Image (tube, coloured by chain):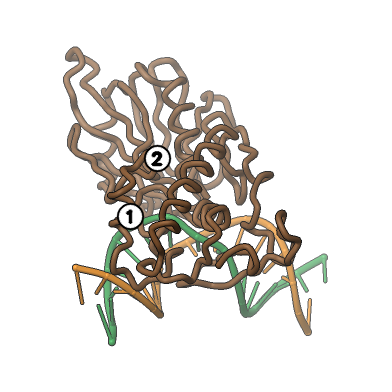
Chain colours: A brown, B orange, C green
DNA sequence: ACTATTTCCTGGATGC
DNA sequence: TGCATCCAGGAAATAG
């Protein structure tokens, strides 16, 4: 499932390959589930737009669009959220169209951007130029005091708080579990119960985990691939995520799996307090 | 203002 | 082998 490091990898890959390119035409499939903007509006806005830049904001891919025919006049932003199984792939016209392809944007360079999403939890949207804002704070290099304040007075488990995009934008199930393990904090601990020291360790753990994961090109679990269809390899460095029953890499205690608000959470009962 | 639960969706795994 | 059932989960919607 694409979280911050995967989205960062994809956005950078897309930017490298299609920044400066112009969308000439758009095909949209019949499934409307992944469309947050009406299909007609989406196609209308995208067609004739130049892709100035593609970047990550939280778990969103943001493409800044300008009028292709009128200099670089800001036109709109194309917001792409991959959900669980979404992919934005660069393809050649002759490449086979995969099942569950919901949108194809034909570019002036003859390449195509294809949005594929079997489970349709992904979302595509066009918004006004320079208007998109992530709901929460950027986790990378967040202000430490601001970070600590996010959890103040919250009775919810720290795991749930980390997944709450209105607090921090970008952390999902994998990196929440991995960060809590490195910080030595149990996922069920109430967010408000974390000491100053806990919060410092958690902050540092998040920075470390996200940086390592970005360097590894993300985690390929489920069906994650980047814009070129390449897999990441951070899954090889997971210490708790999806390692239920396997020995803790620090103390050999079997990793436990519990469910917190419907999400599986993995932790070491000995290393995490 | 928060928090917890339900819902959306398909493919892969599991069970009989 | 085949068919039914369960499960994964991001985030919006709903309920408390």
Question: Who is closer to the viewer here, A179 or A80?
Answer: A179
Q: Give the Cα distance between marks 2 and 1.
A: 14 Å
As drawn, the label of residue A148 is: 1
What residue appears at the point 65 percent right and 53 percent down from the top-left corner? A239
Question: Who is closer to the viewer here, A191 or A135?
Answer: A191
What residue appears at the point 46 percent right and 53 percent down from the top-left corner? A202
Left or right: A100 in relation to A22: right
What residue appears at the point 65 percent right and 39 percent down from the top-left corner? A233
- Considering the numbered disc 2 on the image, is that residue within a helix, a strand or a loop? loop
| Residue A6 screen position, x and y as percent | 51, 40
Classify residue A120 by image quadrant: bottom left
- Considering the numbered disc 1 on the image, is that residue within a helix, a strand or a loop? helix
Mark 1 residue crowding within 10 angstroms, few (<14) / some (14–19) / many (20+): some
Question: Who is closer to the viewer here, A119 or A218?
Answer: A218
The chain that hosts pointer 2 is: A
What residue appears at the point 19 percent right and 12 percent down from the top-left corner? A71
Indicate whether A112 appears above or below A125.
above
Q: Earlier in the sequence, mark 2 or mark 1?
A: 2
Indicate whether A28 appears above or below A184.
above
| Residue B9 screen position, x and y as percent | 47, 61
Indicate whether A184 appears above or below A107.
below
The chain that hosts pointer 1 is: A
What is the residue that sits farthest to the top in this orientation? A71
Left or right: A82 in relation to B16: left
Mark 2 residue crowding within 10 angstroms, few (<14) / some (14–19) / many (20+): some
As drawn, the label of residue A266 is: none
The residue that mark 2 highlights is: A140
To the question of a shared chain for discs 2 and 1, the answer is yes
Residue depth check, mark 2 versus mark 1: number of the one nearer the observer: 1
Report if residue A118 is visible in the image: no
């Amino acid at each position: 499932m694409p979280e911050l490091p995967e989205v960062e990898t994809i956005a950078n890959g897309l930017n490298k390959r299609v920044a400066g390119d112009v969308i000439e035409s758009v095909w949209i499939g019949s499934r409307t589930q992944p469309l947050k903007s009406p299909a007609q509006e989406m196609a209308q806005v995208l067609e004739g737009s130049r892709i100035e830049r593609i970047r990550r904001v939280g778990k969103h891919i943001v493409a800044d669009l300008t009028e292709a025919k009128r200099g670089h006049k800001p036109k709109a932003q194309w917001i792409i959220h991959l959900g669980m199984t979404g992919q934005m792939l660069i393809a050649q016209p002759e490449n086979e169209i995969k099942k569950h392809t919901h949108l194809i944007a034909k570019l002036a360079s003859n390449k195509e951007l294809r949005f594929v999403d079997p489970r349709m939890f992904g979302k595509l949207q066009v918004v006004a130029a320079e208007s998109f804002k992530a709901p929460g704070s950027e986790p990378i290099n967040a202000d430490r005091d601001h970070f600590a304040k996010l959890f103040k007075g919250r009775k919810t488990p720290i795991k749930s708080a980390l997944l709450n995009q209105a607090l921090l934008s970008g952390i999902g199930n994998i990196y929440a579990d991995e960060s809590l393990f490195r910080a030595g904090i149990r996922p069920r601990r109430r967010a408000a119960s974390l000491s100053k020291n806990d919060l410092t360790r958690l902050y540092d753990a998040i920075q470390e985990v996200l940086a390592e994961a970005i360097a590894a090109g993300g985690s390929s679990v489920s069906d994650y691939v980047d814009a070129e269809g390449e897999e990441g390899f951070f899954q090889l460095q997971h210490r708790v995520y999806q390692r239920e029953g396997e020995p803790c890499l620090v103390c050999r205690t079997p990793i436990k799996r519990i469910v917190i608000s419907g999400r599986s959470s993995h932790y070491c009962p000995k290393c995490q307090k």
